[in-house]
Image (cartoon, rainbow, N blue to C red):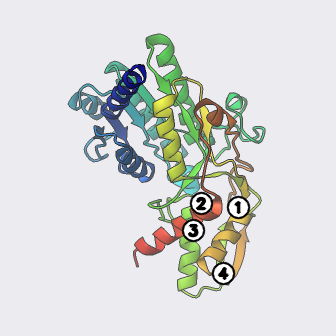
């Protein structure tokens, strides 16, 4: 009898979690669309994810209207990141800082104003100091300036973390801060003007293969290292934090695998079947020398461990791109 009562009580508790009203900013983006699919698969039934055309998060009045229009929000997952890659950050550094500061500040302010029960803000490894000890440890985020080109975006992410922690301290707002490694996967942005490294390389090599090009040019010298996180693994981590984590300290979410750009290029070249030459343009920026996170805290706190190897993730991403590329 006692066991039956416990099971019934646990069932009701789980049902209440799944019926909570969740507002997701950036729900139509790369990470957001994958998150919504998985939330629905797990049984979450009350999801709200308006588009940026409906609510411009750079406009304070529109952000306020967003929270007015959807009453009694239980959980906010703030995914919007106004970042368009290395080239954009180099050309428009002030805009990168300004846009992200405004968006994050307006959203957090209203989350507190409208008494949201739990807020998840998505941080980035760009916030870590350029010369931070490898692998990155969460407590070392404040011990130096970020890599110059990505600094405007990274600093905006730092301010978002501080803002969330201050809101918790002053008002008791439950804000948590996952710090994601470089994401990639199906439905990524493959526009060469604004894409990140993996989708850009997949498109470059695929186009070169189709056009019988003799070479592909890559920025930098290939020595920089990165940690890449498959989007489906990122989604699993966010949901675990939604259900199990309530501390204000930032926490790294990554794959636990470090790979050089040169190694990455070789993998993608082989995957796409391109047989031409690779030309390294060393006059172009290569970005931060190393990025690799210590993810042990995430495993300890809520049992997250990345399941997708870089080879598996690249294959899935490439296959999706082939099926969906616009000719």
Of labels 1 and 3, earlier in sequence is 1
CA distance for labels 4 and 3: 22 Å
SS assignment at label 4: strand
Of labels 3 and 2, earlier in sequence is 2
Looking at the image, can residue 12 be seen? yes
Residue matched to label 2: 197
Pick out the residue farthest to the front: 1
* Residue at the (72%, 29%) spot, across then down: 143
Q: Is disc 4 in contact with disc 3, using a CB cutoff of under 8 Å?
A: no
CA distance for labels 2 and 1: 9 Å
Front disc: 4 or 1: 1
Q: Decide: few, some or many residues near mark 4? Use Cα within 10 Å; few <14, some 14-19, many ≥20.
A: some
Residue 260: % across, % down: 73, 59
Foreground: 300 or 252? 300
Residue matched to label 4: 215
Name the image quarter holding residue 197. bottom right
Q: Is disc 2 in contact with disc 1, using a CB cutoff of under 8 Å?
A: yes
Front disc: 2 or 4: 2
CA distance for labels 4 and 1: 17 Å
Q: Is disc 2 in contact with disc 4, using a CB cutoff of under 8 Å?
A: no
CA distance for labels 1 and 3: 17 Å
Q: Is disc 1 in contact with disc 3, using a CB cutoff of under 8 Å?
A: no
Residue matched to label 3: 315
SS assignment at label 3: helix
Residue matched to label 1: 261
Does 216 sit above or below residue 309? Answer: below
Position of residue 133 in the picture relative to residue 227 (left or right): right
SS assignment at label 1: helix
Residue 37: % across, % down: 37, 50
Residue 157: % across, % down: 54, 35
Of labels 4 and 3, earlier in sequence is 4
Pick out the residue farthest to the left: 69
């Amino acid at each position: 009898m006692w066991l039956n009562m416990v099971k019934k009580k646990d069932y009701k508790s789980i049902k209440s979690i799944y019926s909570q009203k969740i507002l997701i900013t950036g729900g139509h983006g790369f990470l957001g669309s994958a998150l919504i699919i998985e939330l629905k698969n797990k049984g979450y039934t009350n999801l709200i994810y308006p588009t940026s055309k409906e609510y411009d998060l750079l406009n304070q009045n529109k952000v306020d209207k967003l929270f007015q229009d959807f009453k009694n929000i239980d959980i906010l997952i703030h995914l919007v990141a106004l970042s368009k890659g290395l080239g954009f950050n180099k050309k428009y550094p002030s805009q990168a800082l300004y846009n992200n500061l405004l968006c994050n500040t307006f959203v957090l302010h209203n989350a507190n104003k409208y008494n949201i029960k739990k807020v998840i803000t998505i941080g980035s490894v760009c916030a870590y100091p350029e010369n931070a000890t490898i692998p990155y440890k969460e407590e070392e985020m404040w011990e130096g300036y970020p890599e110059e080109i990505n600094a405007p975006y990274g600093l905006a992410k730092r301010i978002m973390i501080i803002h969330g922690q201050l809101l918790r301290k002053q008002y008791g707002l439950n804000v948590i801060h996952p710090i994601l490694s470089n994401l990639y996967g199906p439905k990524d942005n493959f526009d060469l003007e604004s894409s990140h490294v993996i989708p850009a390389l997949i498109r470059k090599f695929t186009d070169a293969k189709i056009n019988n090009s003799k070479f592909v040019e890559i920025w930098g010298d290939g020595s920089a290292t990165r940690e890449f996180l498959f989007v489906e693994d990122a989604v699993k981590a966010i949901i675990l934090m939604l259900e199990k984590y309530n501390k204000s300290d930032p926490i790294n979410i990554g794959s636990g695998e470090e790979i050089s750009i040169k190694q990455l290029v070789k993998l993608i070249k082989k995957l796409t079947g391109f047989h031409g030459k690779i030309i390294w343009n060393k006059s172009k920026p290569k970005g931060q020398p190393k990025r690799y996170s210590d993810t042990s805290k995430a495993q300890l706190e809520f049992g997250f461990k990345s399941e997708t190897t870089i080879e598996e993730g690249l294959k899935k991403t490439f296959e999706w791109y082939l099926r969906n590329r616009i000719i």
